[in-house]
Image (cartoon, helix red, strand yellow):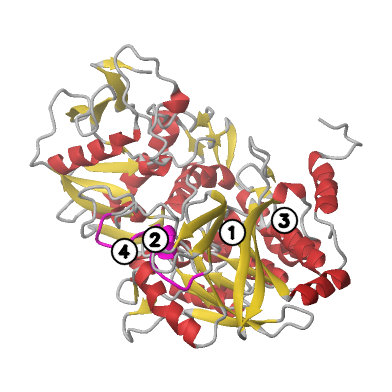
Amino acid sequence: MTSPSGPSRRQVLAVAAAAATAPLVAAGPAQAQQASRRTWDLTVLGTSDTHGNVYNWDYYRDAEYDDSAHNDIGVAKLATLVNQVRAERRGRATLVLDAGDTIQGTPLATYYAKQEPITSTGEQHPMARAMNVIDYDAVTLGNHEFNYGLPLLDLWIRQLGFPALAANAINEATGKPAFLPYVIKKVSLGFAAPTLRVGILGLTNPGSAIWDKANVEGRLRFDDMIATAAKWVPVMRDRGADIVLISAHGGDSGTSSYGPELPNENPTALIAEQVPGIDAILFGHAHREVVEKFVTNTQTGEQVLLSEPSKWGQRLTRMDFTLAREGGRWRITGKRATMLNTNTVVEDPKVLAAVRAQHEKTVGYVNQVVARSTVELSAAESRYKDTPILDFINHVQTETVTAALAGTAYAGLPVLSIAAPFSRTAVFPAGDVKIRDVAGLYVFDNTLEAVVLSGAEVRAYLEYSAKYFRTFGPGATVDPDTVNDPAVPDYNYDTISGLDYEIDISRPVGQRITKLTHPGTDTPVIDGEQFVIAVNNYRRSGGGNFPGIVKTQVYNQQQEIRQLLIDWAQARGVIDPADFYRPNWRLVREGVPVF
């Protein structure tokens, strides 16, 4: 720790970064050296999955962002790194791209989509303000761009000072791309260099057809990213692109979180491998840090460079290309990627100034008190224990759906509710509970829906959810930190309220639900029984590929779950576990509780 009057960690790192990024060779000699060798260079900077982060700020904690690895976040930090690279290169060719998931993810982004939507006020979106300061060359649409509907997305795109790309998002009515598929940028490489034409193709994620079905169904379809690249890369080459870059919102694993009904969710390595004519791919969606990855194209033998810059503005990809003129054409003679860390710099004051009023309004909003909690409620153990704070979500969802179905044909059916432990750090403190506390518990902009499931389908659903846990024999030590399979994210582990059940983690996946009974009884659930299930729109639309849940809704009033939680707390003024907490599930091994 430093003394209060001494430099902070970030100030020290910023000084070190400034020294590290200072140009080693003056611009003039470097250009002369390029001319003598007849080689030139191009730098491409890439961001992705910024998710509404502008300031290095945690709105849920109302404090500067920090984590165990001391990462920083936000477009303001990215801007400083971009400015450093541009200054280092002193006018030589530098492009800046983004691979999507931009306008969702923080209370700042939510505020200007829900509380004061830009579609109603006409105000410029904070992410448009911030990105326009950086002056990107292009952004690709991510799946979360579709969360708030097409009118808000279209307005945001119009507010940008640069193109937004999505070649595989197709207008259902016309069969043509609904957004700009690609751009070809004319780039000056500097002294004595002919113009370089850089083609940039944007590919978005097909999963939007599931995850935002209510917003896109009948309006957009999402074609296969590989097939779309194969279609447009030759077009770009024919239209004069000397090199081709792809900005893709899809990971490189070749797998999907959904079934085979949609094209691959994470195909970027397959695109590099199967589609000739691509020089490099900036990709996102998986929130991973992939500094530099080369994939060999099977048709040409060329090495395609791939890079993914983590999430939230924590990292900036830097791709460097060396080019030469051969036979009147440009050829890449070398390429590499490195990663820059935003925790080495201070925030750019121009970006901060552009968004300051909106940031401060959001901070004021999330610090409004909504209720008083009688005790502290924590989500820390919600993955492996039935906790009151997760039951709070299930209670509000159950109560909302039950009230809505009164007087309908479904009024006599038991209402169950599904909730996932989205956050390991969410806490309702004893005493005042603020909007930011509720938002920290329910971090996604999901809406509430309901469907009817049979008893057999409920069991199958729970069996699928239980794959979240690793297998532990009866005598093995179970560490809460490693109880789950790391391949299954927390948001794809669901708990159900309204029935009693046990998950035996000593048994194989698919055979773990050893008890499933009606609440407070030993009466087993029968396969043919029917239940109404309160569930979020992401899951009901197929997110996570859970079985049986993709059905016609019996309830769908487009109510945001986070707001329902806030409204419930405000209406009662007190959050008391005695009003909603009823433990109904537990982990066991051969009937013996694990915790």
Sequence-first disc among 1 and 3: 1
Residue type, mark 2 in image: Leu
Which is more N-terminal, label 4 or label 2?
A: 4
**Which residue in the protein does label 3 denote?**
77
Left or right of residue 162: residue 552: left
- Per the image, the residue denoted by label 1 is 52
Quadrant hosting residue 6 = top right
Query: What's the residue at 25%, 58% (across, down)?
Result: 260
Q: Are marks 2 and 1 in contact (CB under 8 Å)?
A: no
Of the residues shown, which amino acid type is indicated by label 3? Lys
The image position of residue 145, as x and y in percent, is 48, 66
Q: Which stretch did the figure color magenta? A: 259-278
Mark 1 to mark 3 CA distance (whole Å): 13 Å
Q: CA distance from mark 3 to mark 4?
A: 35 Å
Alpha-carbon neighbours of circle 2 within 10 Å: few (<14), some, or many (≥20)? Answer: some
Q: Assign the magenta stretch its main secondary structure.
A: loop
Q: Nearer the viewer, residue 457 or 341?
A: 341
- Comparing 305 with 152, the one in front is 305
Residue 491, horizontal then vertical, whole percent: 41, 44
Which residue in the rendered view is the most extreme toward the right? 5
Closer to the camera: disc 1 or disc 4? 4
